[in-house]
Image (tube, rainbow, N blue to C red):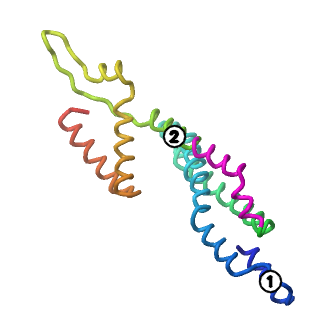
Amino acid sequence: MASMESQRAKEEYEQSEITMQDDLMYNTKAGLMGALAGIGDAIDSGTVQYIFIAIAVPWAQQGSPLGALFPFVCFALYQVLLGLFFARQAFDMGRNATGLMGSTGVKTAIDTLSVLGLFMMGILAGNYVKVSANLQFTISGKAFIIQNILDSVAPGILPLAVVMGVYLFYNKKGLKVTPALLWLTLILIVLASVRIL
């Protein structure tokens, strides 16, 4: 947008033909604020951020402060360097920037990175969400342990249920992280207190 504004100012100063029309600039702004705005979220918050977190989670589990600092520092550094690079690139490309972002290759890259982000979320949920059932009972002298039965039928079903429950909450109520954490904590405390989980 800065490049387009610069081009428009240059045309007006030189009193040459105005090729950078108002409609073109307004439509570009609307496009950048709408459909194109999701590109950064899909790549940065949906993929790269979770890669840094996945790398650091084992360190955090071992009690290392590096587990908390590594994702924060790396993601901040990544954002600064990427921001500087793309700000300069976009200014140089100017009017062609929006055409490039709409190209098939860029769309394919975005779709691929979105799928990678989903894989990373699944890996994090599968490895680090720990929920198990404490229920067990005896029938005719034979002990039935619910967790063993679940593991034999559908391993990891309880962590999946927790993750899907949070997803459904977000889907229904919007991305309200604090209420989701409070409700999840309350439900798990109640289920743990009655020794279901």
- Disc assigned to residue 31: none
Q: Secondary structure at mark 2?
A: helix
Residue at point 72% right, 75% down? 2
Q: Which residue is mark 2?
A: 57
Q: Which residue is mark 1?
A: 18
Left or right of 167 on screen, residue 182: left
Q: Quadrant location of the C terminus?
A: top left
Task: Specify which label sits upstream in the sequence, 2 or 1.
Answer: 1
- The magenta stretch spans which residues? 96-115
Extreme residue in the left direction: 140
Residue at point 20% right, 22% down? 136
Query: Closest to the observer: 146 or 12?
Result: 12
**What x and y, as percent, mark residue 193?**
20, 38
Residue at point 73% right, 80% down? 21
Query: Closest to the observer: 116 or 31?
Result: 31
Q: Label 2 amino acid? A: Val
Disc 2/disc 1 C-alpha distance (Å)? 55 Å
Whether 107 is drawn above or below 155: the answer is below
Q: Is residue 111 magenta?
A: yes
Query: Closest to the observer: 84 or 96?
Result: 96
Question: Alpha-carbon neighbours of circle 2 within 10 Å: few (<14), some, or many (≥20)?
Answer: some
